[in-house]
Amino acid sequence: MQHLVDTYDLTDQQIQDLLRDAKNFKHQKPIQLLRDTLLITLFFENSTRTRSSFEVAAKRLGAAVVHLDPSRSSTNKGETLEDTFANLCAMEPDGIIIRHSDNEIPKQLADMELSAVINAGAGNYAHPTQALLDLFTMMEHFDGNVEGKTVAIVGDIVSSRVASSGIRLFKRMGINVVLVAPQPFMPQSDLPQYEKLEEVMDKVDVIMSLRAQLERHTTPIFDDYEAYAKHYCITKERMGEREILLLHPGPVMRNIDISDEMLKDPRCKVLEQVKNGVYVRMAVLKLLMLDA
Ligand code: CP
């Protein structure tokens, strides 16, 4: 049984296979490879992109999907998460796709070895399918040549599972990563760190902007995000004519993370990331349900 807690669960060959399958799925309507597969989605945190992307990916491959809404589940009557998970597994799904605020939950459930577990985002630790779709989007943009490119991750990096999973995967693929954030948003890291965006604009090939993860701040970090935006919002003025690929995992805080104008600019691939997310998740489901 193979799980996807983070991209360390994948071999180098599996990552290559997955990128190839995602590309093929994007260019050719797939056959119903997972006709006899049943998946359960279990999201303890809100989601627009990841949950619907997994469901679309599963359905495009012919799999059936059941969603359990935790706010209406018996966890509200005191059932433990492990018991909820074990009861769902007793219905013999082929995989459970889970999002949780606790960094450790996907690993703990995977270790029960009752069903394949796919991490759809855990705390500030891991969001492996986001890292894979970001890598796929970069590969597509740079014609497969990402080694030696430099990505600046900008914003609330310390709270971001997108950043932590992305950093692990990008470094593994030979991509340089630099961090740009005000001190309260900067994690402990041996990566190059900058407080000012202007210092990196001529050094980077990709900017990955992140929103402030207010739901993970135990006390408010900034009172005024307009003041923050003056330094960190990606605007047309800051980008100039530079050929920088602009990414954001969403949800975008307009005019704080990225300006309205830049969101319409062809260098900004936010919706392409969402489109690619479906193909990458189709490839992940094929890998875990069929190939592994
Ligand atoms: N990128 C991402 O995880 O978005 P959602 O929170 O909407 O799923």
Image (cartoon, rainbow, N blue to C red):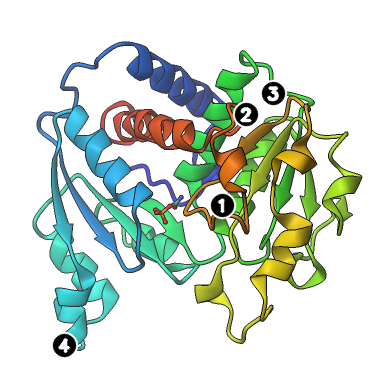
Point 61% across, 66% down: residue: 159
Q: Looking at the image, is mark 3 or mark 2 earlier in the sequence? A: 3
Respond yes or no on whether mark 1 lies under 8 Å from ligand 1: yes
Measured as percent of width and height from the top left, residue 110 is found at 36, 57
Measured as percent of width and height from the top left, residue 187 is found at 75, 65
Instruction: Give left or right: position of 136 versus 274.
Output: right
Q: Nearer the viewer, residue 111 or 245?
A: 245
Q: Residues within 10 Å of mark 2 (few under 14, many from 20)?
A: some
Q: Looking at the image, is mark 4 or mark 3 earlier in the sequence? A: 4
Q: Looking at the image, is mark 1 or mark 4 earlier in the sequence? A: 4
Q: Secondary structure at mark 1?
A: helix
Q: CA distance from mark 1 to mark 4?
A: 32 Å
**In the depicted structure, whether residue 235 falls above or below residue 186:** above
Q: Residues within 10 Å of mark 1 (few under 14, many from 20)?
A: many
Amino acid identity at mark 2 = Arg
Q: CA distance from mark 4 to mark 3?
A: 49 Å
Amino acid identity at mark 4 = Lys
Point 46% across, 21% down: residue: 17
**In the depicted structure, whether residue 69 falls above or below residue 243:** below
Residue designated by label 2: 267
Are dots 3 and 2 in contact, CB under 8 Å? no
Nearer the viewer's eye, disc 2 or disc 4? 2
Instruction: Give left or right: position of 110 versus 145.
Output: left
Point 62% across, 83% down: residue: 220
What label does residue 146 carry, if any? 3
Amino acid identity at mark 1 = Val
Residue designated by label 4: 77
Measured as percent of width and height from the top left, residue 280 is found at 40, 31
Q: Secondary structure at mark 3?
A: loop
